[in-house]
Structure formats: C-alpha cells, structure tokens
Amino acid sequence: MDGIIPLNKEIGLTSSDYVYKLRKILHTKKVGHTGTLDPLVNGVLPICVGQATKLVNILTGSPKEYEGEITLGRSTTTEDREGSTVEEKKLTKPFTTEELNQTFEKMIGDITQIPPMFSAVKVNGKKLYEYARAGLEVERPERHIHIYDFHIMGEPQFDETTGYQTLKFHVKCSKGTYVRTLSVEFGNILGYPAFMSQLTRTESAGIEIGETFTIGEIREMMDNDDHSFIRTIDEVLKDVPAHVLTDEEWEVRVFHGGFLELTDEDTTQQLRVIRDGVTKALYKYDSVRGLWVPDLMLLNNK
C-alpha cells in the first residue's frame, strides 16, 4: 500500500493520534503525517503510506491554506481559545472593513515570527509547551516565513456586550507559519489584544478539503476492501516536471542511483523521472557538475 491519504482531521485529536489509528486500520507501520495540526485545528492532513513516506519532507514544505477567525479585545496564554486570559481591552467601536483590510495587506510578504510557548518546537531537546506547562519561559528561535495571501471573509461581527470584534479570514502561508501568532500580530498592529478563535486547514500539498476523507470513512472503506481513498504518488507529484526515461537511462543510470545528462529541462525545479508510466525518482540539477543528480529514490513505486 503506497500513496497519500487525503485525511480530514477532526477537532480534538493530534496529528500523531491519526498516524497511530491509521497504522492499525491499514495494517502497516509505514505511515507518516505531513505537518502537525494542533488538536483545536481541523481540516486537510495528508498522510503518507508505504513508499510515499519518503515524500513527507517535500509535502510538509509546501504552502498551506487556512480559513479561521480572529477575536479582537482579548489575548490568551495559548494564543487560541483554549488558553487563559492574559489581557483584555474592550473595543468602544468596531473597526471598519476598510481598516481591517488595510491591516491584512500590511502582513502580506516576508515576516519574522517567534513560536508561541505553547508549541511543539524544541529548545535544548525539550518541547516549548513542556516549559510552558511548568510555568517557565525560554528564549525562542526566530522563524522567517512568507504570507502569500491574507484577507477578510464576509462581514466582521461586533458584540457590544463583551466589546469583542470577530472576523473571518483566509490565509495562504509558507511552511512553519503559526497562524495563532499571526492572529496576535494582527491585533498588535491595531493596538488591541487578540487571539485565534477558530482555524481550519483548507488546502495542503495540492489537496483541498472537499477531497478529504474522515477516519470513519477510511475505516469503512477498508472493511469493504475499497482502497480508492489513497492517492498514488504520481497523482500527488503531477505538477512536478517529468522526464520519460530511455532504456539506457533507466537500466544503466537511474536504477543504480546514477547521474543524468539532460539539456532540455528546467534546471530551477525538481524533475521526476518516469519509467513504465510511474515516477521512479526525483532529481535536482547540480550546477557545479552540470548534471542532474538523485534527490529522492522511489524505485519500488508501481
């Protein structure tokens, strides 16, 4: 069983919980997820199985898309709705949609973030949330991320009783982005405490939320010997430029992990090399040698 499962993660479980469950359902140990989603976040979580586990780092590194909600007027220890209140500053009047849009626009581009204390980033071999639960705060490494798109969705809502304003948003961001922290930074620009009150990942590794399956659906399909929920490696890599191997290139070079001399390919991108209609390896261009060299071998892909 080799391929990628477009899983719809539900609220309440960790990404690792799903890996554990799927190992039992699929009767295989070779299962890996492509990027941690917090228990309070739901949505697209591509799961790699068998040979496809070699693709985990590549798929994890792809941009992600989310839809969520920011609440202005209160901040929390965890930067989401689960934490205790850190600061409260009620709005006397709501921000206009124009003011909110201008703030979103300011945050598009390259950004430096500091991971929240309640996160799985390791410092000195220990996860940050372990320090946080012990009441400790440590120095955290900066992260350089990129925001491709960040905009408001629908009409913002204002509660005169609480003095909170909530707004729905869509964001497309690079690997390593903490959307919780992005929500807090959004509030900082406006001069108000803020937290992320809801988040759904809507796209990851080219998989959209409408194409996903729940763990219950996967279990039922497996009981019926239906494996159609698994995407092949070639389906997931379809947008990577491809080169069809000649007999000599396959038998003498690629099969033995050798270099390739190709003159008509785009040297700025990875290249997947195909034999009998399936991807057998990913190559990258080595400008020093002037050759294509193996980047990831998938020789057993069928």
Image: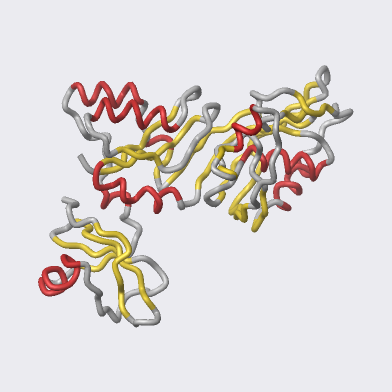
Say if 170 sits above or below 111 in the image: above
**Front-most of residues 160 and 55:** 55
The image quadrant where one finds the N terminus is top left
Q: Quadrant of residue 95?
A: top right
Percent from the top left, x then y, of residue 39?
Answer: 52, 27
Say if 105 sits above or below 131 in the image: below
Percent from the top left, x then y, of residue 219?
Answer: 27, 23
Query: Which residue is depicted at the point 34% across and 51% down?
Result: 55
Is 287 on the left-hand or right-hand side of 3?
A: right
Say if 269 sits above or below 153 in the image: below
Q: Can residue 178 be seen in this view?
A: yes
- Among all residues in the image, which is located at the extreme top? 161
Total of numbered circles in the picture? 0
Is 280 on the left-hand or right-hand side of 132?
A: left
**Front-most of residues 244 and 292:** 292
Percent from the top left, x then y, of residue 168?
Answer: 65, 34
Query: Which residue is depicted at the point 32% across and 54% down?
Result: 237
